[in-house]
Image (cartoon, rainbow, N blue to C red):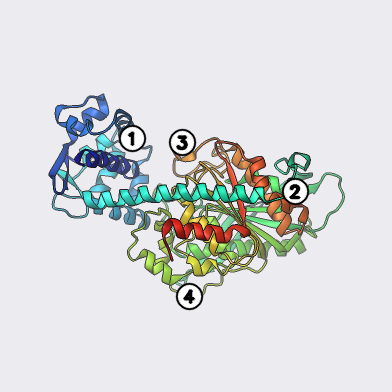
Amino acid sequence: MLKKTLAYFFGIISSIAISTPVLGADRIEFNYPPFGDFNIATKDLEVFVNEGEITKDFAFYANRTNPEQLAQIRKMLRTKFQFSPVFVSQFTYSPIGVKILQRFGELLQTPSRQNGFYALRSALILSAASPDGLTLVNIIKNYSTSSIRLDFSESMQIMGQLSDLLQKRDLVISKIQQIADKEAANLLPIDFAQKPDIRKSGEFNIEKIILTLQNYSRDGHSGSVLERKYDVDVYLPKPKSGTTSEPYPVIVISHGLAEDRNSFVYIAKHLASYGFVVAALDHPVANSKQFQQFLAGFDGPPKATELIDRSLDVKYLLDQLQHLSKTDPRFQNKLNLQQVGLIGHSLGGYTSLALAGGTFDFENIHKDCNPNRSLNLSTFLQCRANDLKPDNYPIKDDRIKAIMVMNPLNSTLLGEKGISKILVPVIMVAGSHDIFTPAVPEQIRPFTKLSSKDKYLAIIENATHFSVESDLSLSPRAIPVPQELLGPDRKSVYSYMNALGVAFFKTHLCNQEEYRLHLSASYAQFISQAPLNLSLVDSGSKEAISQLLNWVYQTP
């Protein structure tokens, strides 16, 4: 029992090192009843990390893990985090950063068993400012207390919960894949190789037009008038034959936190080649440029009101396109603004759900955020809504007829009540290995609560939160993303999103029923490529997935 427990302790240390790279000062102390007090001297750990040698005292712990685990732990502990001191300072002083550090401070306490929040923050900032950068050794050297007290019982409980959640997630994903296979087996056989390949570009040429918009809104807290200025890339279809066409349906792309309008260039161009006008906007707050300014100390963090203002950015864009369709020769008779689609990623996914009719569930927000004990990282961002005045905000836009949301966050903001208000067609895209907006709470369970008659759930095995994004060289992120979080090569994911986007919007914006057969489990099987295998289910599987979730999570 003791051997297993000490091995488990190393797992806790490793996880902490990844999330908040902090170990301690002279020693790490913990109590494991009924066996008593234990401690690891940081000098012994430093020798292990830097030289790979196991001291006599450290051997007591090292001998209780297998060689593979030990090698993995050493690799984790040697990780150098490429963050500047300004970035670390800005983030750890931001509302979300404070909440995250306070949560870890409950686990990594001072010797007097107080929350280790301040020691953690100072150690992170001082270490990032040192010549050797943000490493575990430097954090240990800069830690402000003589030792660090690990709340071992709480840590074990959290690690157990996390392990349980991951096992249940994998089970749910596996069972949904089986449901999709069953769906495919029940469909009439279709030889998709003989059908047009909608993964390839369509028949339209594309003209790119850059618009600069200036909107004025009123700050809900101060009452002052705010200017929101932002650029929009409009991808306009141009018939190759030179003949005129019907007005084109419009699709707006809403990016996520620290992204920009270049984050989904591939699908914007692809949809435009199929006869859609695609408008990709830079939200003026929480985009990559503004986030870089925030991390550099030149701007503040996004306010809670950004959860409303992002949707108003889209509404204002649609209003301006309506105006341009009457006054600008480039757009006259080319925009069908009564058939609008939305694509959103992450925070942009929430934006799309809200514009489609999803409403804030303030009762659910208060329950989840007071306090926030969730292991779902996106809850830290969603709990910003706890600062909003409960109200019925005018977010929904009736021009929007269908939405495609990738890795959206919504479980706290909208809850089951809020998401059930959405009636338009929805395709929800989830990555099985998304640690920021985890698939089960943020996409799979919400899928079962949608009231839409036409709804689809696409799950990409081994995909991360960033797998759907364009090549990062086109849209460099404000925060460095380690390769492990980017996941496998994303080219196959691009082909999935392109094909599903064409099929979904052709079916539900253009009423072209011949594309509906591509919104099927069998088509997903046809285009699926390992290791990023694609599964797709539709509304017919809603009850089966609901029953699966109730069984796995034992909910009534």
Amino acid type at image mark 4 = Asp
Q: Which part of the image, by quadrant, shows the N terminus?
A: top left
Q: Nearer the viewer, residue 104 or 189?
A: 189
Q: Which part of the image, by quadrant, shows the C terminus?
A: bottom left
| Left or right of 91, for residue 534 | right
- Contact between marks 4 and 1 (CB within 8 A): the answer is no
Q: CA distance from mark 1 to mark 2?
A: 46 Å
To which residue does mark 1 refer? Answer: 76
Percent x, y of residue 10: 26, 39
Percent x, y of residue 255: 55, 52
To which residue does mark 2 refer? Answer: 274
Q: CA distance from mark 1 to mark 3?
A: 14 Å
Amino acid type at image mark 3 = Gln
Disc with the residue nearer the chain's start (4 vs 2) = 2
Disc with the residue nearer the chain's start (4 vs 1) = 1
Q: Is residue 228 visible?
A: no
Q: Is residue 20 visible?
A: yes
Residue in the picture at 54% in, 39% down: 472
Q: CA distance from mark 3 to mark 4?
A: 41 Å
To which residue does mark 3 refer? Answer: 483
| Left or right of 113, for residue 210 | right
Q: In the rendering, which numbered label is found on residue 518?
A: none
Disc with the residue nearer the chain's start (3 vs 4) = 4
Label 4 or label 1, whichever lies nearer to me, is 1
To which residue does mark 4 refer? Answer: 391
**Tag 3: Cα neighbours inside 10 Å, few (<14), some, or many (≥20)?**
few
> Against 212, is 52 above or below?
above
Amino acid type at image mark 2 = Tyr
